């Protein structure tokens, strides 16, 4: 494993840990200024939209995200990862957790200082069936 792949793995790990902690302050420096998030059934959002949606969601729910990197490809100053993600979303007010699962592709750009920043992100997270019944959830921006 080369230094770029190691750095991208570290960014991915830091991202997931910050999502689980509800730590927007730790997430923002991991994003490019022109970052774009693509979520199923919704218009693309940038940095400001992500920040607003993330803060609102974490005020309402606890999020536990598990993410397994399945592929990392580095081509010069651009890289992408493909991961398999699972989220458990529990209302802070109480109630049953909702389970989401799917895949994610993330595009990173290498900065002049050597850091890799998240530039684009798209996922296929959806509710999964548990004991024959469908779970429902509000969309999350992670």
Image (cartoon, rainbow, N blue to C red):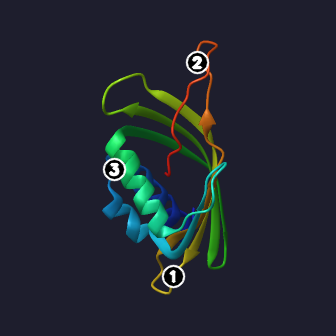
Disc 1 vs disc 2: Cβ atoms closer than 8 Å? no
Residue that label 3 marks: 22
Query: Are discs 3 and 2 less than 8 Å apart at CB?
Result: no
**Mark 3: secondary structure:** loop
* Residue annotated with mark 2: 130
Spatial separation of the CA atoms under disc 3 and disc 2: 26 Å
Q: Tell me the residue at 66%/49% (across/down).
A: 40
- Whether residue 20 can be seen here: no
Secondary structure under badge 2?
loop
Figure quadrant of residue 74: bottom right
Observer-side mark, 3 or 1, equals 3
Q: Quadrant of the N terminus?
A: bottom right
* Residue 15 rendering spot, x and y as whole percentages: 43, 56
User: Percent x, y for residue 6?
Assistant: 50, 63
Q: Label 1 near label 3: C-beta < 8 Å?
A: no
The answer to which of marks 3 and 2 sits earlier in the sequence is 3
What number is the disc on residue 111? 1
Number of residues whose C-alpha sits closer than 10 Å to that of mark 3, classed few (under 14), some (14–19) or many (20 or more)? many
Report, in whole angstroms, how far the alpha carbon at label 1 lies from the one at label 2. Answer: 43 Å
Label placed on residue 56: none
| 101 in relation to 94, above or below | below
- Percent coordinates x, y for residue 41 in the rendering: 67, 49
The quarter of the picture where residue 36 lies is bottom right
Q: Nearer the viewer, residue 55 or 100?
A: 55
Residue plotted at (37% across, 23% down):
95
Place of residue 42 in the rendered image (x, y in percent of width and height, measured from the top left): 63, 53
For marks 3 and 1, the one nearer the N-term is: 3
């Amino acid at each position: 494993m080369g230094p770029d792949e190691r750095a991208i793995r570290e960014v991915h790990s830091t991202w997931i840990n910050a999502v689980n902690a509800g730590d927007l302050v730790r997430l923002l420096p991991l994003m490019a200024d022109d970052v774009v998030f693509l979520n199923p059934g919704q218009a693309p959002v940038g940095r400001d939209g992500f920040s607003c949606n993330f803060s609102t969601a974490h005020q309402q729910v606890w999020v536990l995200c598990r993410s397994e990197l399945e592929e990392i490809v580095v081509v010069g100053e651009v890289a992408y990862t493909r991961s398999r993600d699972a989220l458990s979303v529990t209302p802070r007010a109480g109630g049953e957790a909702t389970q989401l699962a799917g895949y994610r592709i993330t595009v990173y750009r290498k900065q002049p200082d050597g850091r890799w920043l998240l530039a684009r992100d798209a996922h296929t997270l959806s509710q999964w069936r548990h004991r024959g019944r469908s779970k429902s959830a509000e969309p999350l921006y992670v």
